[in-house]
Amino acid sequence: MLLKISYQPKNTDIGQFHHPSPFVYIKTILYICLHHFLFVYSMKRIVGFIAAFFIGQGIAWGQSDSLVYVARYKGDKACAISYTFDDGLAEQYTLAAPELEKRGFRGTFFINGSKVNENGKPITDTTRVTWGQLKEMAERGHEVANHGWAHRNFARFPLEELKKDILQNDSAIKAHVGIPSRTFAYPNNNKSEPGKSYVMQGRTGTRLTQWSVGSKRSLEDLNRWADALLKNKDWGVGMTHGLTYGYDAFGDPSRLWKHWDYVKSREDSIWVATFVEVAAYVKERDSIQLVTEQTDKG
Ligand SMILES: [Zn+2]
């Protein structure tokens, strides 16, 4: 008997239990008990035991086709976390990105082009990144994405002005970083319906919900958040601004590094990836129709 699984598109993982469900084990144990009871006073005890084992396995194999599913997250992990950093602060390049990389993680950096220091010119604002630094980060696997050219609040600006602002930032990112921005984070997290439907066009995702990762969070808060994501099988999107300075800065960011150590230690069940990677996965996962059929061939 051959189990054929087909699904489109093909970039999403298929999960398969390596062990039968607990129900199957219970059945197996019941069979073993039954046979043990039947043969307990006979010399054929061992035969009964072996027979029960194969009956149990037969049930497990017979049920295996119903145990195929589309993995909720890449690598069949239980939950996902994307760490996002807003406003293009210089320390996101000097501190956050290297600390992420040490643990094999990559982050998403939502930037405002108007505040990024230009290449080849004296740095006008030492608190902000340069285009060269952003390009370097993108080459190392981080995501550099659109947070509006001038951080225009969607609730306060007319759509026509927002459109120009968004397009200008898209063009600047493409020109300086070399990779188009496929996601967007709303400045001040303010959204308007027309603004939202405009900015979503042609993008993999936009940051609609986020959990603030900053000055108010203790290490315990951060780790509890990861535990809750694991429990609820959720995708958590953390939002950070400042590390030692700037809006909502940690002051001492070492507790963020310790939190990343904690997440790293649970790497077998937590998928840490950029916003665009998880958004693409979830989009594809939710649109998949998994078709399984049994054939007699093979
Ligand atoms: Zn911002």
Image (cartoon, rainbow, N blue to C red):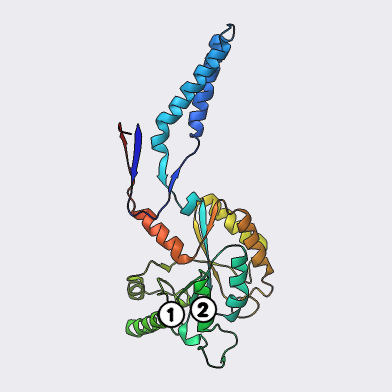
Q: Nearer the viewer, residue 146 or 2?
A: 2
Rendered image: mark on residue 173:
1
- Quadrant in the picture for residue 201: bottom left
Q: Is mark 2 within 8 Å of ligand 1?
A: no
- Which element type, helix, strand or loop, lies under badge 2? helix
Q: Work out whether mark 1 precedes mark 2 in sequence or the reverse, and give the earlier one.
A: 2
Q: CA distance from mark 1 to mark 2?
A: 9 Å
Q: Position of residue 37 (x, y in %)?
A: 56, 12
Residue at numbered disc 2:
134
Q: Position of residue 95 (x, y in %)?
A: 63, 74
- Quadrant in the picture for residue 69: top left
The quadrant the C terminus occupies is top left
The quadrant the N terminus occupies is top left
Above-or-below relation of 75 to 27? below
For the residue carrying disc 2, how many other residues have a C-alpha within 10 Å: few (<14), some (14-19), or many (20+)? many
CB under 8 Å between discs 1 and 2: yes
Point 46% across, 21% down: residue? 55
Residue 109 in view of the camera: no
Which amino acid type is marked by label 2? Leu
Point 30% across, 33% down: residue? 297
Q: Nearer the viewer, residue 281 or 247?
A: 281
Residue 288 in view of the camera: yes
Which amino acid type is marked by label 1? Ile
Which residue extends farthest top?
42
For the residue carrying disc 1, how many other residues have a C-alpha within 10 Å: few (<14), some (14-19), or many (20+)? many
Q: Position of residue 30 (x, y in %)?
A: 52, 21
Q: Position of residue 134 (x, y in %)?
A: 51, 78
